[in-house]
Image (cartoon, rainbow, N blue to C red):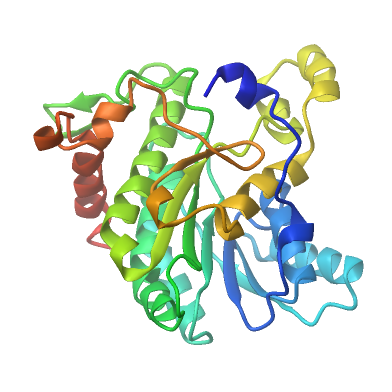
């Protein structure tokens, strides 16, 4: 899919109006107190869902819950706080234990939160461990659905066509792990390629158990522009690019659209909710050596499991 099509996507075809009532269903939105995650949490709550807003600051969650309840006083849903620091792997099991002590189901896990640090913590290892620990409740929820594909894992990546190292991840043979680049943006994009690899690998492992796992580029939005562009440029580009609600539409498509079938499991989704494809230079990494690829995606999964496994 062309870069232009991702920078200037057509109007979204799947929005909050297409999401049915979610009474009785349970969702986790990491980073749900601000930006795209906040918009997503609002939509889910309006649809009467139980929404766990997961971030590391209790005050932010409290403010977000108060704001959302004020906007949707008629909702029959529930908003719950989940204190979660994705940069501190030791805290993640505590958060999962807190969640599973209160809930018997999890319909969609939105791995929405990300960071810009040099390491792979917030972007990759934290969401990997969170998903791994939530796997039992996701599987038990999927087992109760009559048809596959209702239980989903959504991994928020980025626009991988620009700035991503060749192959997605550069492997350091000396450390037997991802290389640390001198350029911060290369590290960031490498981590986002890793997110897409995990979305694909989870699809391989859980697809036959009824779970759909996809990754996505949420879209270039004003929130993202403000972080990455000089003030004069983001003022101009802000006129063209959309607000965070549009990124929420991309995530809604990944989490709910019936267009995504079992055959699409592991797909990479582009703004504002379309089935896309990873850059050509990344595709061999998502095939095994027996399939003519490099097997890097699976190798990265193994590294994440070994690195996060002790927590």
Residue located 88% across and 70% down the image: 72
Quadrant (top left, top right, bottom left, bottom right) of the C terminus: bottom left
Specify the quadrant of the image occupied by residue 128.
Answer: bottom left
Query: Depth check: 59 or 27 in front?
Result: 27
Count of numbered marks: 0
Residue located 32% across and 69% down the image: 209
The answer to whether residue 31 is seen in the rendering is yes
Q: Is residue 213 left or right of residue 179?
A: right
Residue located 77% across and 19% down the image: 234
Residue located 81% across and 22% down the image: 240
Q: Position of residue 38 (x, y in %)?
A: 72, 55
Q: Position of residue 299 (x, y in %)?
A: 19, 40
Q: Position of residue 55 (x, y in %)?
A: 59, 59
Q: Position of residue 149 (x, y in %)?
A: 46, 65
Specify the quadrant of the image occupied by residue 47.
Answer: bottom right
Q: Is residue 94 above or below residue 310?
A: below
Q: Is residue 79 above or below residue 199?
A: below
The answer to whether residue 59 is seen in the rendering is no
Q: Is residue 96 above or below residue 19?
A: below
């Amino acid at each position: 899919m062309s870069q232009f099509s991702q920078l200037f996507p057509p109007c979204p075809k799947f929005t909050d109006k297409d999401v049915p009532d979610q009474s009785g269903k349970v969702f986790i939105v990491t980073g749900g107190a601000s930006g795209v995650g906040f918009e997503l949490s609002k939509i889910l709550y309006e649809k009467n869902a139980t929404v766990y807003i997961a971030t590391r600051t209790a005050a932010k969650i409290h403010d977000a819950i108060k704001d959302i309840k004020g906007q949707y006083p008629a909702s029959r849903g529930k908003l719950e706080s989940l204190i979660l620091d994705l940069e501190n792997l030791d805290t993640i099991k505590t958060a999962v234990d807190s969640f599973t002590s209160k809930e018997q189901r999890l319909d969609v896990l939105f791995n929405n939160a990300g960071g810009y640090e040099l390491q792979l913590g917030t972007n990759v290892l934290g969401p990997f461990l969170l998903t791994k620990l939530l796997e039992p409740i996701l599987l038990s929820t999927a087992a109760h659905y009559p048809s596959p594909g209702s239980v989903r894992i959504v991994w928020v990546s980025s626009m991988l066509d620009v700035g991503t190292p060749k192959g997605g991840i550069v492997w350091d043979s000396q450390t037997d792990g991802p290389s640390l680049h001198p350029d911060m943006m290369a590290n960031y994009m490498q981590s986002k390629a890793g997110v897409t690899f995990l979305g694909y690998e989870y699809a391989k492992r859980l697809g036959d158990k009824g779970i759909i796992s996809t990754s996505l580029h949420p879209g270039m939005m004003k929130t993202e522009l403000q972080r990455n562009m000089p003030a004069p440029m983001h003022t101009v580009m802000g006129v063209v690019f959309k607000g965070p609600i549009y990124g929420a539409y991309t995530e809604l498509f990944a989490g709910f659209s019936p267009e995504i079938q079992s055959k699409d499991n592991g797909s990479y989704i582009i703004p504002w909710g379309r089935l896309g494809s990873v850059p050509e230079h990344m595709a061999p990494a998502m095939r095994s050596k027996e399939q003519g690829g490099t097997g890097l995606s699976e190798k990265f999964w193994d590294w994440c499991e070994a690195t996060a496994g002790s927590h």
